[in-house]
């Protein structure tokens, strides 16, 4: 049976459709269309064949059934190189369909609407569309399946040049089609399973954002995939304004820095970070003050590090940052003058990051050999109050301010974690030691050296100390007392808490128990 080539068109996303179909028609193709797609094409001067003219059967059940018919799927699925298939088509009066242009009902957009009902969601579950897509994708050797408007130009150009698409193009489009239906079914499954209270399956969807030169080390391959969901404080949606591409380690470090920045809302804040641990962090009256204090906290470790602030970077702070060797600077915005200053360093990565408020619960995913750990992202931080004090001596107002700052920083330091703080800035950070006393000694000795550079003896500085986990013995408090620590915040919860309380009372140190730990592994 000889006839014009036929394209079946039924799309939800109508971007670029009219021009694409007009291009097919100009090449002497016949166009079969359904419902709203047919109306759009006819309104734009494209002659079409209605789906009911093909099936000989009306659309029924409010459009739920219109393309589920042998004259549609026979025309798509019949193998052109199999005589028995073609003989069956001839006997049944079925014409072949050479191209299927289908994308699916907007389920994702529907369930994202405020107040959407389950009934609305269900009516946006496509049935005929996925069936046609899968039929065409299965028979890719004979049929071109187009789900993505971005492919219209390529498909049209190949048909114009060669009369039909190439085998390579049809195979790639088939793979894209199965991805399209898989993503669609995953969204529906996730939605329905949530409604049904089922949680024994985990479906995740990420798109390739960029290939990376290598992973943690040069011999490891790596890629960066981005979630389909756009969220604040995310490198996946950050705008890079200058510098080289991000590396695997850059992304890990920058993500850790953004999680620290999230803690401080609108309070001017700046953090310098190396190897996923803060090396200097501070709040200030403005961005210049916050940067200056964060830099002064540890001028050595910040070399080759990452800086993040929740303030707009202006020319004044840019001039202060420029002489320092930094890998990345992240901020919600940069003034034109700041960019003029910083972009003279061609390798310095400047990232504009959405730092808007994010009240939603977010999940964190960590792969392990053969599995995946899932937990709620640790976005909760208690604000310290006087009733948390467990010692005879209560902290002063100034100490409470520093304790609150220490508590927000220590949760982002690798456990065992200790930070020493004075005047809204870190002086010492002890990270990742196998025992808490070791971390305390590192932080306290670092603070001692930092203060000594300023001509201040640590025993008279009235620094405060924060710990991410409880003290299992009184030795950490004793070590702190030797350095003149003026106040301590820790979660509490040890069976030997009283030993730590007694040691604090012995040395006249106020100590607060938050009742919440913040381990970071």
Image (cartoon, rainbow, N blue to C red):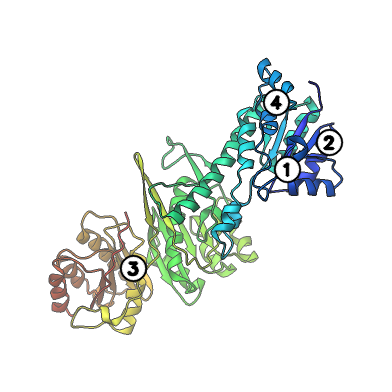
Q: Determine whether label 2 and label 4 are within 8 Å by CB.
A: no
Rendered image: mark on residue 58:
1
Q: Of the residues tagged 1 and 4, which is closer to the observer?
A: 1
Q: Which residue is mark 2?
A: 25
Q: Position of residue 309 (x, y in %)?
A: 49, 65
The residue at the point 20 percent across, 61 percent down is 437
Is residue 45 shown above or below 363? Answer: above
| Corner quadrant of residue 476 | bottom left
Rendered image: mark on residue 166:
4
16 vs 28, left or right, is left
Q: Is disc 3 placed on a helix, strand or loop?
A: strand
Q: Is disc 2 placed on a helix, strand or loop?
A: helix
Closer to the camera in the image, 495 or 160: 160
Q: Of the residues tagged 2 and 4, which is closer to the observer?
A: 2
Q: Of the residues tagged 2 and 3, which is closer to the observer?
A: 2
Q: Is disc 4 placed on a helix, strand or loop?
A: loop
Earlier along the polypeptide chain: callout 3 or callout 1? 1
């Amino acid at each position: 049976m000889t006839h014009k080539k036929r394209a079946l068109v039924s799309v939800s996303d109508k971007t670029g459709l009219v021009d694409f179909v007009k291009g097919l028609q100009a090449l002497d193709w016949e166009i079969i269309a359904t419902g709203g797609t047919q109306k759009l094409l006819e309104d734009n001067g494209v002659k079409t064949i209605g789906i009911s003219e093909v099936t000989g059967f009306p659309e029924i059940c409010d459009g739920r059934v219109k393309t589920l018919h042998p004259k549609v799927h026979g025309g798509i699925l019949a193998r052109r190189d199999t005589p028995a298939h073609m003989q069956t088509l001839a006997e049944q009066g079925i014409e072949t369909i050479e191209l299927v242009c289908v994308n699916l009902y907007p389920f994702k957009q529907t369930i994202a609407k405020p107040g959407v009902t389950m009934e609305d969601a269900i009516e946006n579950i496509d049935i005929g569309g996925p069936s046609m897509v899968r039929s065409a994708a299965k028979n890719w050797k004979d049929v071109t399946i187009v789900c993505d408007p971005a492919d219209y130009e390529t498909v049209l150009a190949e048909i114009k040049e060669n009369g039909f698409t190439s085998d390579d193009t049809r195979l790639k489009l088939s793979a894209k089609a199965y991805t399209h239906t898989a993503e669609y079914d995953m969204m529906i499954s996730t939605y329905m399973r949530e409604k049904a209270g089922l949680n024994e399956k985990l479906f995740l969807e990420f798109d390739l954002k960029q290939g990376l030169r290598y992973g943690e080390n040069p011999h490891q391959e790596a890629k960066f995939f981005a979630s389909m969901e756009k969220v604040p404080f995310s490198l996946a949606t950050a705008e890079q304004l200058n510098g080289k591409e991000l590396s695997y380690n850059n992304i890990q470090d920058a993500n850790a820095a953004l999680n620290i920045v999230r803690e401080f809302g609108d309070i001017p804040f700046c953090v310098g970070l190396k190897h996923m641990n803060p090396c200097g962090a501070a709040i200030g009256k403005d961005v210049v003050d916050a940067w200056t204090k964060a830099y002064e906290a540890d001028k050595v470790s910040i070399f080759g590090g990452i800086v993040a602030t929740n303030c707009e970077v202006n020319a004044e702070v840019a001039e202060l940052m420029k002489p320092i060797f930094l890998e990345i600077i992240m901020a919600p915005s940069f003034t034109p003058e700041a960019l003029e200053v910083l972009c003279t360093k061609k390798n310095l990565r400047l990232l504009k990051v959405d730092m808007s408020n994010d009240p939603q619960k977010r999940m964190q995913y960590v792969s392990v050999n053969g599995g995946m750990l899932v937990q709620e992202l640790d976005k909760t931080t208690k604000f310290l109050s006087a009733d948390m004090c467990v010692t005879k001596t209560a902290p002063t107002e100034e100490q409470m301010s520093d304790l609150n700052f220490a508590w927000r920083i220590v949760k982002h330091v690798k456990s065992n974690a200790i930070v020493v703080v004075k005047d809204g800035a870190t002086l010492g950070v002890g990270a990742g030691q196998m025992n808490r006393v070791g971390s305390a000694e590192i932080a306290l000795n670092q603070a001692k050296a930092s203060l000594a550079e300023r001509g201040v003896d640590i025993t008279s500085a009235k620094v405060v100390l924060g710990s991410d986990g409880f003290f299992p013995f009184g030795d950490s408090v004793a070590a702190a007392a030797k350095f003149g620590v003026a106040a301590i915040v820790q979660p509490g919860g040890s069976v030997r808490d009283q030993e730590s309380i007694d040691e604090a009372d012995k040395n006249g140190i106020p100590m607060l128990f938050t009742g919440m730990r913040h381990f970071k592994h």
